[in-house]
Image: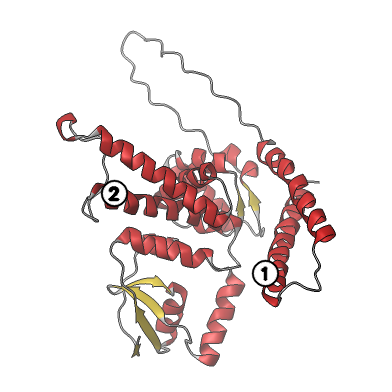
Amino acid sequence: MSDTTMIKLNIDEIFKNLIRPLRKEEYKQLEENIVKDGCREPIIVWNGTIVDGHNRYEICNRLQIPYSVKDMEFTSRDDAIAWICSNQLGRRNISEETRKYLIGKKYEAEKAIGSRNVLGINQYAPIDESLPYDDFNPEDAQTGRVTASRTAQRIGDEYHISHGTVQKYAIYARALDDLAEKEPTLVPQILSGRLKISHENIVELSRQDAGDVRKLSTQMAKSPQAYMKYSHTREKIKPRAETVISNTTTTPLPAIKKMPEYDPDAEVSGLMLTIPSWTGSIDRTCAAADFGKISAKARENLIKALNDLQMKISKILDSVKEED
């Protein structure tokens, strides 16, 4: 770790987007703390690029407050991204949207690392299955798929979700990255939970033209409401029209297989199916455990887990009651 006054550090937008966006009151509180006590935590960097501490760096440079720098070593960008995601996921005050995004990004990064390690590919070379046939080895592709499956299973076990959910979060993360390219200011609104939008609608929105996405961002900026529902704004966002090349003679388009209609109750119904198992586990623990004899560590962990669960329950109750 090195002490410094003011040095120029690089900001990578992909790294920065992985950092939980602070609400206005949180940013103000951080600034007040730094003004009062100085920058107590170092800015963490890799090869001169910030991987943690973007908000502290901005505040310190704006107010000319000294800070320290801690260098980290990573073997590749994917390695750095995986570390940032793990670091952010360890924070207790991230939104559910941010958690999904970070798990998806962590999976994509670790999948790439695993595939390169197994296939012996240079860490900076992209994985590409669309190679010329003579250069493409189906066994390598199969190895990559196996590695991806194992990575999803491992991350799912780590965060107590299924490997299929991990892969679903990866789709969610890619859709948010597409949105960030079209309108960077919209993504923090989604990750903070200010814009209430489902996974399916995130994917739909990411496919819209940049101009339509900016319309939604403008609505968000003008709205005095603390939260907005995408369903209340989506009528102003037209679905992307498919491009049709017409000649003098109109050629009928081939029939497209009809996809199942979106079910707005699907996510809630799935959640309701899991609740009885929670209550059953709690009832069994209350009946069988002697809370007077459990260790202090177990007690501390249980209290933390129950408090976290209580916060999640309060959050979803508030969301449901808003619609009454």
Q: Is residue 201 left or right of residue 291?
A: left
Q: Is residue 321 above or below residue 40?
A: above
- Can you see residue 129? no
Q: Residues within 10 Å of mark 2 (few under 14, many from 20)?
A: few
What percent of the width, then of the height, locates residue 123? 24, 56
Q: Nearer the viewer, residue 214 or 324?
A: 324
Foreground of the two, 79 or 138? 138
Q: Which element is circle 1 on?
A: helix
- Asked whether residue 230 is in view, the answer is yes
Horizontally, residue 66 falls left or right of residue 278, namely left
Amino acid type assigned to the residue bearing label 2 in the image: Val
Residue 143's place in the image compared with 48, above or below, is above
Whichever of labels 2 and 1 marks the residue nearer the N terminus, that label is 2
**Residue furthest toward the left?**
134
Q: Which mark is residue 47?
A: none
Along the line of sight, which residue is nearer the eye, 34 or 28? 34
Q: Disc 1 residue type?
A: Asn
| Gap between marks 2 and 1 measured at Cα | 37 Å
- Expressed as whole percent of the image width and height from the top left, the position of residue 299 reads 72, 72
| Furthest residue toward top | 249
Residue in the picture at 61% in, 45% down: 230
Q: Which mark is residue 301?
A: 1
* Callout 2 touching callout 1 (CB < 8 Å): no
Question: What number of labels is visible?
Answer: 2
At x 29% / y 75%, what residue is drawn? Answer: 48
Relative placement, left or right, of 5 versus 60 is: left
Q: For the point 31% across and 76% down, which residue is it? A: 9
Q: Please tell me which residue is depicted at 74% across the width and 47% down the height of the picture.
A: 277
Determine whether, in the image, residue 324 is placed left or right of residue 100. right
Classify mark 1: residues with Cα within 10 Å, few (<14), some (14-19) or many (20+): few
The residue that disc 2 covers is 118
x then y, percent, for residue 126:
25, 48
